[in-house]
């Protein structure tokens, strides 16, 4: 075979390889950029403002909250376990926990684990578009390994531990010694990352106070025009033996700046004092 014939044969082989490669691209689903294989995170949720409206007043307020949290928790050894709660339901504690976690996780310096510890009305998985098979309840009731239940979202360095399988005794699980041991284990096992717990509200349920006693700090969410002053005082009194980092004032009216964002802008007063 002459050199010309060999060159032609080689060209034909390369052409066939390129055809096979193109066929493979068409038949095999390609992974979505920034999303880990097997995980579908819907970052188009309008309430995840730090992703979808990064230059909005609301997103800027969450960045301010992040800065305050970092300042308060990095005095000496990192205080890496933080609970987010509120007086009653519907005050935006979950959205505060989510947006804070995402803001922290988008920085190179911070790795974040967000835990849905509201086993009664879990919602983190819905905001992120995740359909997990196992989560926190499975770790507590069945002894599932934490590492097997954690999901990498593909949003910066954010991982989540969802609520898990539905259980009939959420209060018993979250008040148990297993829960306390789990918090301690995660605190030391993931000592270099922030661990944020979204818990049930304080007044209706006992779980928030119990978890608050074993975490490093508590962020208390108050929604404008929601809970009464007396209820807020009662809830804060129930948390008096926890380390309350401060209060974030949610859903504040900032119509003088921009009506579009007035429904969800948080304000914060974090002082590190009870």
Image: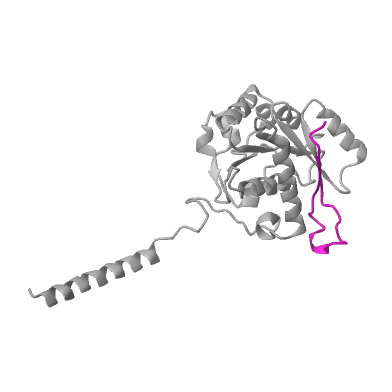
Question: In which quadrant of the rendered image does the N terminus lie?
Answer: bottom left
Q: Is residue 100 above or below residue 141?
A: below
Q: How is the image coloured?
A: one colour
Q: Is residue 224 left or right of residue 242?
A: right
Q: Can see residue 205? A: no
Q: Is residue 110 left or right of residue 224?
A: left
- Name the residue at 53% across, 28% down: 143
Q: Give the image location of residue 176, x and y in percent.
A: 66, 24
**Magenta stretch: helix, strand or loop mostly:** loop
Q: Nearer the viewer, residue 63 or 15?
A: 63
Residue 253 lies within the magenta run: yes
Q: Give the image location of residue 234, x and y in percent.
A: 88, 32
Residue 73, quarter of the rendered image: top right
Q: Give the image location of residue 147, x and y in percent.
A: 51, 36
Marker count (numbered): 0
Question: In which quadrant of the rendered image does the C terminus lie?
Answer: top right
Q: Give the image location of residue 192, x and y in percent.
A: 58, 35
Outermost residue, left side? 1
Q: Is residue 236 above or below residue 266?
A: above
- Name the residue at 64% across, 22% down: 177
Question: Magenta segment range?
Answer: 247-274
């Amino acid at each position: 075979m002459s050199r010309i014939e060999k060159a032609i044969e080689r060209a034909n082989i390369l052409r066939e390889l390129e055809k096979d490669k193109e066929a493979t691209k068409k038949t095999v689903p390609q992974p979505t950029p920034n999303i880990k294989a097997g995980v579908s995170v819907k970052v188009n949720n309008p309430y995840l403002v730090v992703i979808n409206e990064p230059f909005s007043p609301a997103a800027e307020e969450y960045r301010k909250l992040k800065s305050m949290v970092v300042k308060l928790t990095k005095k000496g050894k990192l205080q890496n376990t933080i609970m987010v709660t509120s007086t009653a339901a519907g005050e935006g504690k979950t959205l505060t926990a989510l947006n804070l976690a995402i803001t922290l996780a988008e920085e190179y310096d911070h790795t974040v684990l967000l835990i849905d510890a509201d086993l009664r009305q879990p919602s983190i998985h819905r905001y992120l578009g995740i359909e997990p098979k196992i989560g926190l309840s499975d770790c507590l009731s069945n002894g599932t390994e934490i590492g097997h239940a954690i999901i990498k979202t593909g949003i910066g360095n954010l991982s989540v531990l969802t609520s898990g399988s539905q259980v009939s005794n959420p209060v018993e699980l979250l008040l148990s010694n297993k829960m306390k041991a789990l918090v301690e284990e995660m605190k030391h096992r993931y000592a270099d990352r922030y661990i944020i717990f979204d818990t049930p509200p304080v007044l209706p349920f006992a779980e928030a106070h119990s978890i608050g006693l074993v975490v490093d700090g508590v962020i208390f969410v108050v929604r404008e025009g929601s809970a009464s002053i007396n209820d807020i005082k009662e809830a804060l009194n129930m948390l008096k033996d926890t380390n309350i980092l401060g209060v974030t004032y949610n859903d504040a009216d900032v119509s003088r700046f921009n009506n579009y964002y007035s429904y969800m802008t948080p304000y914060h007063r974090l002082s590190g004092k009870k």
